[in-house]
Image (cartoon, rainbow, N blue to C red):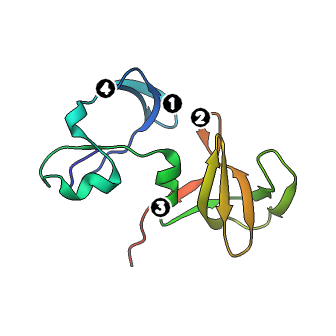
Amino acid sequence: MGWRNGHTIKLRVIDFVNNNIYKVVINEETFETYFINIEVYNKYNRDKMANVNPYQFVYEYESWLDYLKWVYFIEKHNITIYDKPNGEIIFEDKDNASLRFKVVDMDGDWIKVHSPRFDGWTQWKDNEKILIFITETLYI
């Protein structure tokens, strides 16, 4: 959520109470949570954001899959790639500090990933702990 002029606050939604009340994580280290009430008229998704008044405070919602698909890149240290979630290992790199990849699908705690070196599934979170590093944009 945030102002369209560049100020953004991102919160991870972990539960829906109803259409307007959401339980969000406000501290990823301590897993502290709060409930927020969001008015329906301020909800937008990425496709509808172009038509929003640039000075209006808005809440932008995306599924994890949609979010992970549009980010610049994702990294994971000591990556293991499986043929399917909890399947057989098809690629493993324990020596590399991290490998970059793009997300193409999701199944619970698992994401299907693609890179020039591998295609397959890796675990992106373990219950509530996120195991990947996300880079949204790259400034040069």
Between discs 2 and 4, the one toward the N terminus: 4
Say if 77 sits above or below 128 in the image: below
Between discs 3 and 1, the one toward the N terminus: 1
Q: What whole-number distance in Å separates the C-alpha atoms at marks 1 and 4?
A: 22 Å
Q: What whole-number distance in Å separates the C-alpha atoms at marks 2 and 4?
A: 23 Å
Horizontal relation, residue 49 to residue 81: left or right: left
Mark number displayed over residue 137: none
Choose mark 4 or mark 3, whichever is in front. Answer: 4
Identity of the residue drawn at 69% across and 58% down: 77
Identity of the residue drawn at 59% across and 34% down: 128
Residue on which the image places disc 1: 31
Q: Secondary structure at mark 1?
A: loop
Mark 4 and mark 3 residues within 8 Å of each other at the beta carbon: no
Choose mark 2 or mark 3, whichever is in front. Answer: 3
Residue on which the image places disc 2: 128
Is residue 129 visible in the rendered structure shown here? yes
In the image, what residue type sits under mark 1? Phe
Mark number displayed over residue 20: 4
Dot 1: within a 10 Å radius of its alpha carbon, few (fewer than 14), some, or many (20 or more) residues?
few
Residue on which the image places disc 3: 71
Q: What whole-number distance in Å separates the C-alpha atoms at marks 2 and 3?
A: 20 Å
Q: What whole-number distance in Å separates the C-alpha atoms at marks 3 and 1?
A: 23 Å
Mark 3 and mark 1 residues within 8 Å of each other at the beta carbon: no
Choose mark 2 or mark 4, whichever is in front. Answer: 4
Q: What whole-number distance in Å separates the C-alpha atoms at marks 2 and 1?
A: 8 Å
Q: Secondary structure at mark 3?
A: loop
x%, y% of residue 31? 51, 30
Choose mark 1 or mark 4, whichever is in front. Answer: 4
